[in-house]
Image: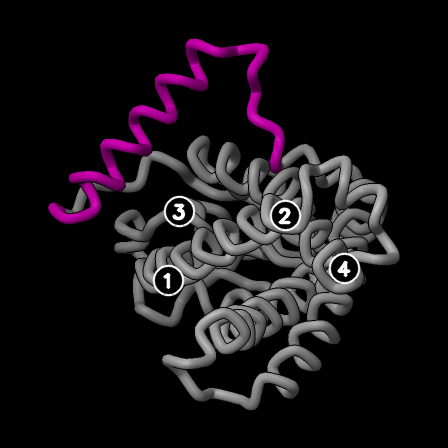
Amino acid sequence: MTRIFLHPLPIRIWHWVNALAFIILILTGAQIKLGNAIHFFSFQTAVKIHSWLGWLLVFNYFIWVIYYFSTGNIKIYIPPLHRPVEFAKKALRQAKFYGWGIMVGDENPHHSTFENKFNPMQQVSYLMIMVALIPLQLITGMLLWDPKLFEPVVNLAGGLQIIDLIHVFLWIFFSAFIIVHFYLATLGHTPMAHITAMFTGYEELHDDHGHGHGESHEHGHEEHSESHAQDKSHSH
């Protein structure tokens, strides 16, 4: 068994703060919107928790931005669109694996490394989420938090109903995303392999690791690469 270093400490902290905050925000958002049907919290408590965690997510998002841009690792999110045909072929191959190959035990076509963590489908989806959907969710949340303070922006966006509609749509999207993300995270060589890696930073590789979903594993990467990847993550 070998190990590969994939997740630096700042990203592990960011990931778990983000995950926990999103789950609680989804629950409090449901309480705020569907108060007659569910009773997780009182309305006042739900609003208070939702507001505080919303600001925590704003702060946490800037941690992500500062880390990835200051280290140059933001490149792992950028699809190589200067090679569109090659990228499209890899994306189709990955889609085929997700749609069929994973169920029949085929090898994952993507082999993650510290510098190439995401497969083509992950690059596109995570880039869209991180540079568009999360900022949009945070901005609409801020506008709903204090419409009077941000009244010019609220009016420019078409009013509170439009902003609320966008915020609720993204609430539904992220609720579904968390379920899918958790499912994919259980598809390593053991159900906890990828989840454990997000705590420790290291992905353990086994002889049969080719059947995982590719979020955080690599073929044939030797143990000595751990220190190299760690040094690289702190040298920028």
Looking at the image, is mark 3 or mark 1 earlier in the sequence?
1
Q: Which residue is rendered at x = 47% and y = 39% of the image? A: 122
Labels 2 and 3 touching (C-beta < 8 A): no
Comes first in the chain, label 4 or label 3: 4
Residue 177 seen anywhere in this rendered image of the structure: yes
Query: What whole-number distance in Å separates the C-alpha atoms at marks 2 and 1?
Result: 25 Å
- N-terminal of the two: label 2 or label 4? 4
Neighbours of disc 4 within 10 Å: few (<14), some (14-19), many (20+):
some
Residue under numbered circle 4: 58
Name the N-terminal-most of marks 4 and 1.
Answer: 4
How would you rate the neighbour count of disc 1 (Cα within 10 Å): few for under 14, some for 14-19, many for 20 or more?
Answer: few
Circle on res. 214: 3
Q: Mark 1: which secondary structure?
A: helix
Q: Is residue 22 left or right of residue 231?
A: left
Q: Does any portion of residue 216 appear in the rendered image?
A: no
Instruction: Give me the C-alpha separation between circle 2 and circle 4.
Output: 17 Å
Residue 197, image x and y in percent? Answer: 51, 66
Magenta stretch encompasses residue 169: no
Query: Which is the main secondary structure of the residues drawn in magenta?
Result: helix
Q: Quadrant of the N terminus?
A: bottom left
**Residues tagged 3 and 1 counted as in contact (Cβ below 8 A):** no
* 94 falls in the magenta region: yes
Looking at the rendering, the stretch of residues picked out in magenta corresponds to 77-104
Badge number at residue 163: 2
Q: Residue at x 30, y 47 (%)?
A: 210
Label 2, label 3: how far apart the Cα atoms are: 36 Å
Residue 236 % position (x, y): 85, 44
Give the mark nearer the N terminus: 2 vs 1: 2
For label 1, the residue is 179
